[in-house]
Amino acid sequence: MPDSAPAAEAVRPPEPVHDPRLTNEDLAPLREQNWSSYNIFAFWMSDVHSVGGYVTAGSLFALGLASWQVLIALLAGILIVQFFCNLVAKPSQVTGVPFPVINRSVFGVRGANIPAVIRGLIAIAWYGVQTYLASQSLIIVFLKFWPSTASWNQHTFLGLPALGYVAYAILWVAQAAVFWKGMEAIKRFIDWAGPAVYVVMIALAVYLVAKAGWGNISFNLAQGRHLDVTHSFTTMLSAIALVVSYFSGPMLNFGDFSRYGKSFDAVKRGNLLGLPVNFLFFSLLTVITASATVPVFGELITDPIHTVERIDTTFAILLGGLTFVIATVGINIVANFISPAFDFSNVNPQKISWRTGGMIAAVGSVVLTPWNWYSNPTAIHYTLDLLGALIGPLFGALIAGYYIASRQRVAVDDMFTLDPRGRYWFRRGYNPNAVWSLVAGGVPAILAVLVPKLVLDLDVATVDVTWISNYSWFIGCGLGFVTLALLERSRPMIKVMDPA
C-alpha cells in the first residue's frame, strides 16, 4: 500500500488587525483572565469599607429612620446593586474589554467617547471626594503626634486649611504610586486592604460595646422629625435609592474589573459574597458602632473618623486613622482611578496611555475642590442625586444595547476598526439612537434634581417635592433603557448577529 499522505499543517487564522487609533495594550481584549471569586470579593470589600461608605450609611439616620429601618434600606439597596452589577459585568467579562470599548458596540466606535468622557468626569469628582474624606483621617494622626500642626489650620485657601492640603497631597501621591505599578499591584493591594479594615472595625465595635454595656445600647437612633408609618415607608424608599446612587459609580465601572474574571460564574460568586453577604456584616457593624457612641460619648457619631478621634488614645488613633486611609485609598483606586484611566485613554489611545488617563483624573480632582461641596448630610444626598442622574442613562443605554438590541452578541474585532464597513461604524462612527437615549434619560434626571430644590429655595411653591431627586438614577436609567430599546426597534442601527 502506498504511504499515507502527510498530514496537512494546521493553518492558523491571521491575527486580527486592530486600528491603532482605537487600541493600545490596555484597551485590547485580554489574553488572560485570571481573577477568582475571592479577587472580586476583595474588590467589593475595598469598595464598601471606605469613609464615604460609613458616612453615607450614617447619614441615613438624619432622614428620621430608626436603626432597623436603616439596616433594611441598606440591604434592599445592595441587593438592587448586585442585580445590576451582574448585568453590567457580563459584556466585559465575555469580551475581555473595558467599559469604553464595549460601549463601541452600542454608541459606535467614535460615539463611545461620549459615555467615556461623561463617566471620566464623574470619576474625577468622586476621586476628589474620597481623597478628601481619607485626608481627614490623616489629619487626626497629624494632630495627635504633631500637635504643633494645629497652627496650620489658621491659614485657609479656597475653603481648605494648609494642614488639609498637606494631608490631601500625601494621599494623592500615595494613590498615584499604587496606581502607577499597574493592575497586578492593585489586585494585590485590594486583596488585603478590605480584610484589614474589617479587623479594625470589629475591634472598634467590640471596644465601644464593651465600654457602653450591651444593655445601654439603644437602636432607636432616628434624628429629626418623628415619622409616621406612611412617611417611614417613603423615606425608606428614598434611603434605598440613595444607597443605589452611592454605588452607581462602582456599579457602572464594574465591567472594567469583571473583564479580568476567570468566568462569568466566578464573577457572580464574587458579587454574591462581596455585596449582600459582605454588606450585611458591614451594615451591622455600622449600626452597632453608631449606636454605641450614644452611651459612650453622649451623642450619636456616624463618622468613624470622629469616633476614633473621641477615643483619644495614641494607639487607637494611629491604627484607626491609618486603616481608614488604607480603606479609602482602596476604593478610590478601584472605583475612581482605573475607570477614568480607561475612559481618557479611549479618546486617543496612542497619545493617552492608561497611566496618563489616570493622572488626568487625579489632577482634575484637586481643581474641583471637593471639600466645598461634600461636607454634610444634605450636601452628600444632593451630590449623590446629581451624580446618579448623570450615571443612570449611561447604564440604561449599555444594558439595552447589549441585552435587547444585540441580544448578547458582540463582534469583538469590529470594535477596533474605523472601516465604514464595520458593524459598529453606524453613521460616521456614531449610533444616533444611543446618543438620543442619553439625552432622553439625562435631561429629565438632572432636572429632577435641580428643579425641585430651586423651586423650594425661591419659595415659588409651598409643596416640597425634592424627594423626587432621590430617584434620579432610576429615572435616568429607566428612560435611557426604554428610549434605546424603542429606537432600536423602530429604526434599528445595531444589527443582530447570526448565532453561528
Image (cartoon, rainbow, N blue to C red):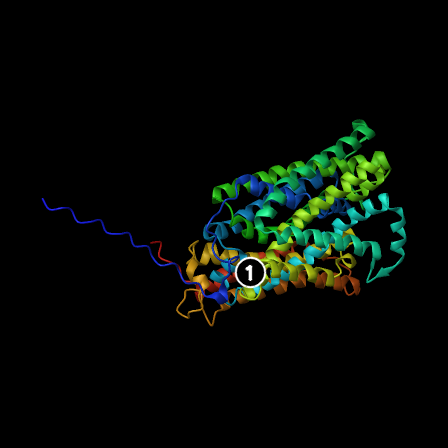
How far from the left and from the top, in percent, is residue 415?
45, 62
* Residue under label 1: 480
Q: Dividing the picture into quarters, in which one does residue 365 lie? A: bottom right
Q: Does 101 sit above or below residue 52?
A: below
**Callout 1: 10 Å neighbours few (<14), some, many (20+)?**
many
Q: Kindly tell me whether residue 15 is visible in this rendering.
A: yes
Q: For residue 293, what is the image quadrant?
A: top right
Q: Position of residue 476 (x, y in %)?
A: 60, 59
Horizontal relation, residue 225 to residue 172: left or right: right
- Foreground pick, 422 / 72: 422
Q: Residue furthest left?
A: 1
The residue depicted at 90 percent of the width and 53 percent of the height is 151
Question: Residue 13 versus residue 385: which sits nearer the camera?
Answer: 13
Image quadrant for the C terminus?
A: bottom left
Q: Label 1's element?
A: helix
Amino acid tagged 1: Gly
Residue 61 coordinates in the image, percent (x, y):
76, 44
Q: Nearer the viewer, residue 3 or 284?
A: 3
> With 202 as the anchor, is 403 left or right in this view?
left
Residue 211 shown left or right of residue 468 in the figure: right
User: For this rendering, which residue is in front, 234 or 181?
Assistant: 181
Residue furthest bottom in the image = 428
Is residue 230 visible in the rendered image? The answer is no
Query: Which residue is situated farthest in the front direction here?
Result: 3
Label count reads 1
Which residue occupies 87% across, 50% down? Answer: 149
Q: Tell me where residue 258 appears, x and y as whole percent.
A: 53, 48
**Viewport quadrant of the N terminus:** top left
